[in-house]
Image (cartoon, helix red, strand yellow):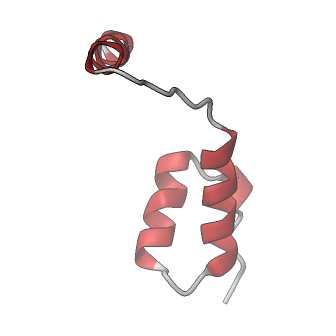
Amino acid sequence: MTKANYQAMSDAELRDWVRYHPQDTEAFHTLMDRLDLRPKVITRTDEEFATELQRRISQAS
């Protein structure tokens, strides 16, 4: 079996790889490292949450 190149995979491809190869701990750790590097947004109120959700929906459009 050849080793997969996790760095060349997109986030979606790596997520799918981990989903279908749950025994691949290296891929799992690579995915978790990528997710940990993403910016975090903390909302403390329902209004902050609604504002952040609307911002993300607008970005996706």
Give the total number of marks visible in the rendering.
0
- Report the residue at 31% width, 9% height from top: 58
- Report the residue at 60% width, 81% height from top: 24
Decide if residue 10 is on the left or right side of residue 50: right
The quarter holding residue 6 reads bottom right
Q: Nearer the viewer, residue 8 or 59?
A: 59
28 w.r.t. 6: above or below: below
60 w.r.t. 10: above or below: above
Residue 53 spot, x, y in % from top left: 31, 20
- Report the residue at 49% width, 80% height from top: 21
Q: Nearer the viewer, residue 9 or 25?
A: 25
Residue 37 spot, x, y in % from top left: 69, 40
Residue 18 spot, x, y in % from top left: 50, 70
Decide if residue 28 is on the left or right side of residue 17: right
Q: Quadrant of the N terminus?
A: bottom right
The quarter holding residue 23 reads bottom right
Residue 59 spot, x, y in % from top left: 39, 12
Q: Quadrant of the C terminus?
A: top left
The quarter holding residue 2 reads bottom right
7 w.r.t. 54: above or below: below
- Report the residue at 42% width, 71% height from top: 19
The residue most toward the front is 45
Decide if residue 39 is on the left or right side of residue 2: left
